[in-house]
Amino acid sequence: MTTPFHHEPGAVPPPQCPAHNLGVGPGGLRRLYGPEAENDPAGLYDKLRAEHGTVAPVLLHGDVPAWLVLGHSENLHLTRTPSQFSRDSRRWRALQDGSVAPDHPLAPIFTWQPVCVFADGATHERQRGAVTDSMERIDTRGVRRHINRFSNRLVNDFCQKGTADLVGSFAEHLPMMVMCAIFGMPEEYDDRLVEAARDMTRGTETAVASNAHIVSVLTRLVERRRDESAPDFATWLVEHPASLTDVEVVEHLRLILIAAYESTANLIANVLRMVLTDPRFRARLSGGHMTVPEAVEQTLWDEPPFTAVFGRWAVGDTELGGQPIKAGDALLVGIAPANTDPTVRPDLTANMEGNRAHLAFSGGPHECPGQDIGRAIADVGVDALLMRLPGLELAVAESELRWVGNIMSRHLVELPVKFAPSPQQELDSDPLSVMARAARPATEWEVSSPSGPAPAPASAEPGVIPPAHLPDEVPEPYPPVAVPEPASEVPAPTAAAAIPQQQRRRPAPARLWQAVSRWWNGH
């Protein structure tokens, strides 16, 4: 078998060649970067599918060859068969022969690090176990409470103006605020951290410097936690029985921070754009026929936060989608094209409500272990924003919205809106509460649901959703999801202080039936 990668990486066609304007490089292969790929990725996927089928040869930055997997079943095979397709980037033939330099724009993404997403087998199990065990210690009720508080804090910054950019003022800041709190470094949250997180995955000239800034911040955090423990995610990784080194802890924190930030910022922006530009979508949401979590899930099908994940590397010569894959070849998990694969989704306008077969969080042993923190941030954040500003309208024509893209994601630049000015909301001034999950009494009733409930109504205390979010990884079992009681059942703080806890709670069977009723009704 022969491979279509017969050209020399980095070779440039002659000036008069029309390939310069068509996103086509040496050997007639299409570039997965540049104006065409950034402005119309869906159109590019259609062309690649028509030309090559479910697995297509493409060019990365510098015209470095790789394979983009377009088919849904082919992507599942790619992610679920580590014996054939490894996550260890050191296998990449382009790295071994020097075709890809250490300062390549995508270096922050593919450079091997001692983290679970670059490992297979026992090493992967040890490192990922530390991550998932630590995530299970997160108090998801407390996280949702902070998401709501941070959302309202951000809305307070622009609610009196009557106009705002929901990307720059909301979607790009909320995930970073939440993740800094979970990690135990709320004081590190600032615009520089947000800018660095946005920059480092986009193949820019400053991506390496942005990555260095984030590593520096996280290194200081790990050093502090080695000296002094705290009830936060960083401490749990440091103290986990897997005995991660400082470098391993820093790199896993970096991985989780960037994956959670980039994907969730994109997800929030995409959900809000659909609400503002699709009348049917908004009508179903405002009319109670669709919950915010259902809106988020539909968006994960139509506009996944990550369009592709780089990468996998072939362990040996094999075949995928009828294409000859050589040992050391690089492959990308094509999330967006898999979600629109005609074999699984012939009608792209069909309602995908309740269907989680999308690949928004990849699949296989590397599926995102913390994807539900991303879901929670989007669910609670979008709900809080729409509750505060119910009359939101797009301030420009939909055709004026602009996007920037790269091989991993498509990012909405701005989402200008207008609304009736509203007063700021008073926020509690309490410091961040403990994020650690408290042990529950064995007799306490609890209702569990693997799919996670919708956010509670505004009058209720924020509910609970299972842990968290990364970009590349078949789902881990979700921890139990506790359904909270309506706030109306909870006495006012002054009265509560005088009533013993056991007298304030409804009888357990009544609470159970109430929780089941709320779950059945989608609340």
Image (cartoon, rainbow, N blue to C red):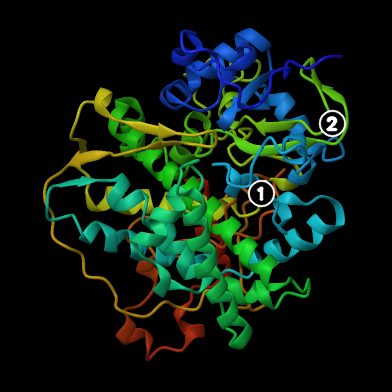
Q: Nearer the viewer, residue 483 or 24?
A: 24
Q: Give the answer, above or below, for where 438 lies relative to 451.
A: below
Percent of width and height locating residue 161: 12, 52
Task: Please tell me which of labels 2 and 1 falls first in the chain.
Answer: 1
Identity of the residue drawn at 52% across and 68% down: 216
Q: Which residue is mark 2?
A: 327
Q: Secondary structure at mark 1?
A: loop
> Mark on residue 159?
none
Residue shown at 21% from the left, 60% from the top = 157
The answer to whether residue 142 is visible is no
Determine whether, in the image, residue 326 is placed left or right of residue 19.
right
Residue 261: x and y, percent? 48, 53
* Residue in the picture at 60% in, 32% down: 335
**Residue at position x 66%, y 33% from top?**
333
Amino acid on which the number 1 mark rests in the picture: Thr
Q: Nearer the viewer, residue 406 or 505?
A: 406
Q: Is residue 274 above or below residue 90?
A: above
Please indicate, yes or no, whether residue 302 appears anywhere in the rendered image: yes
Locate the N terminus by quadrant. top right
Tell me: residue 237, above or below residue 95: below
Q: Residues within 10 Å of mark 1 (few under 14, many from 20)?
A: some
* CB contact under 8 Å: marks 2 and 1: no
Residue 309: quadrant of the picture: top right
Front-lying residue, 62 or 363: 62
How far apart, in angstroms, are the residues tagged by discs 2 and 1? 18 Å
Please name the residue that numbered disc 1 is placed on: 111
Under tag 2, what secondary structure? loop
Mark 2 Cα shell of 10 Å, populated few (<14), some (14-19), many (≥20): some
